[in-house]
Image (spheres, rainbow, N blue to C red):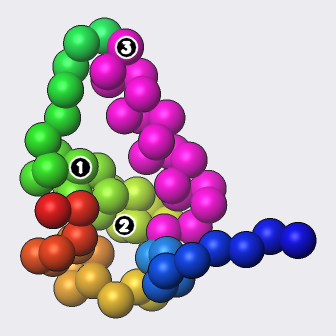
Amino acid sequence: MVCSSGPKTVLTKSEEDTLSNWLVEMSKIGYGRTVPELKLIGKEILDKDGWENPFKDNMSGRGWVE
């Protein structure tokens, strides 16, 4: 059985994995990322996938990851 708590995620599992892997690789080379950079990468993922989401112009707003 698979359970989760909290609200439904906006990104798909695949998109979350892409973002997570990118963050891990950046940390391995000592290149920490800022919240605005993380949001921009999320936007790029959503732009590429092209599916409808709650963000204006595919960019998360205040309160997401902050």
* Left or right of 50, for residue 36: left
User: Magenta stretch?
Assistant: 11-28
Q: Nearer the viewer, mark 2 or mark 3?
A: 3
Residue at (41, 34) in percent of width and height: 22
* Mark 2 crowd level (few <14, some 14–19, many ≥20, 10 Å Cα): some
Residue at (37, 13) in percent of width and height: 28
Question: Mark 2 and mark 1: span between their CA atoms?
Answer: 14 Å
* Left or right of 3, for residue 33: left
Residue at (21, 19) in percent of width and height: 31
Q: Secondary structure at mark 3?
A: helix
* Left or right of 47, for residue 55: left
Residue 38 marker: 1
Question: Mark 3 and mark 1: span between their CA atoms?
Answer: 16 Å
Q: Is residue 23 part of the magenta span, yes or no?
A: yes
For the C terminus, the quadrant is bottom left
Q: Secondary structure at mark 2?
A: helix
Q: In the rendered structure, which disc, 3 or 1, sits on the residue that comes first in sequence?
A: 3
Q: In the rendered structure, which disc, 2 or 3, sits on the residue that comes first in sequence?
A: 3
**Could you tell me if residue 53 is visible in this image?**
yes
* Mark 3 crowd level (few <14, some 14–19, many ≥20, 10 Å Cα): few
Q: Mainly helix, strand or loop, the magenta region?
A: helix
